[in-house]
């Protein structure tokens, strides 16, 4: 699933929802319901339909609002996910969907060392700011494959501020 498909812009709210009707629109992108019934929601990108960048999708899964905070309260707000559930959907549950959960999707001994370092603690910021997150380092197979120009790697033994 792609959280950005539920982005409640004018197209979603005033064309799509109007065409399917208000009752059916209440069952749009029912991630929380899937989770409550022990289903697995695997998130990813539907590129090139939406961006490869996962952060706007994470923000949408949490808020069900546009980046401007509309609609107030969110589109079908009872289907919002927690940050923990959203991260799992993008990582371990996506690996599960690809039959790779034994080698990917979480940081555990014996799994591939594919991980990222980001510029903020997602658990300490407002969900509406998650879309601004930047990846500083990307590791694949334990090797750094990307370093942001904004990455400031302190010398060994020196703590960053």
Image (cartoon, rainbow, N blue to C red):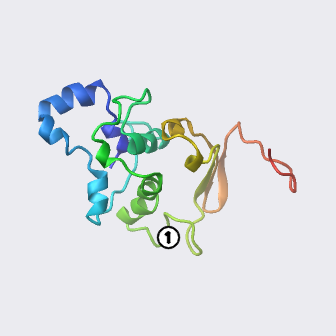
Left or right for 67, reference 23: right
Query: What residue lies at 36% left-to-right and 28% top-to-bottom?
Result: 70
Instruction: Please identify the quarter of the rendering in which residue 62 is found.
Output: top left
**Identity of the residue furthest to the bottom in this view:** 110
Query: What residue lies at 47% left-to-right and 54% top-to-bottom?
Result: 87
Left or right for 65, reference 110: left
Query: What residue lies at 67% left-to-right and 40% top-to-bottom?
Result: 148
Q: How many marks?
A: 1
Q: Residues within 10 Å of mark 1 (few under 14, many from 20)?
A: some
Residue 36: where, in percent of width, then height? Answer: 29, 61
Determine if residue 117 is in view.
yes
Give 12 or 152, whichever is nearer the viewer: 12
Give 96 or 57, whichever is nearer the viewer: 57
Image quadrant holding the C terminus, namely top right
Question: Under tag 1, what secondary structure?
Answer: loop
Residue 137: where, in percent of width, then height? Answer: 66, 48
Give 112 or 20, whichever is nearer the viewer: 20
Q: Which residue is mark 1?
A: 103
Query: What residue lies at 34% left-to-right and 36% top-to-bottom?
Result: 74
Residue 144: where, in percent of width, then height? Answer: 67, 54
Instruction: Please identify the quarter of the rendering in which residue 75 is found.
Output: top left
Left or right for 138, reference 150: left
Determine if residue 46 is in view.
no
Left or right for 160, reference 67: right
């Amino acid at each position: 699933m792609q959280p950005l498909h539920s982005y409640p812009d004018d197209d979603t709210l005033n064309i799509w929802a109007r065409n399917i009707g208000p009752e059916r629109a209440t069952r749009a992108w029912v991630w929380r319901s899937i989770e409550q019934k022990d289903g697995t929601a695997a998130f990813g990108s539907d590129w090139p339909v939406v961006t490869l960048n996962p952060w706007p999708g994470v923000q949408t899964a949490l808020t069900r609002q546009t980046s401007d905070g509309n609609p107030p309260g969110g589109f079908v707000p009872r289907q919002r996910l927690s940050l923990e559930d959203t991260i799992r959907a993008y990582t371990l549950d996506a690996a599960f969907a690809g039959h790779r959960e034994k080698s990917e999707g979480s940081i555990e001994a014996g799994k591939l060392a594919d991980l990222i370092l980001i510029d903020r603690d997602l658990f300490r910021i407002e969900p509406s700011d998650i879309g601004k997150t930047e990846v500083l380092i990307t590791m694949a197979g334990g090797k750094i494959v990307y370093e942001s120009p904004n990455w400031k790697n302190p010398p060994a033994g020196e703590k960053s501020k």
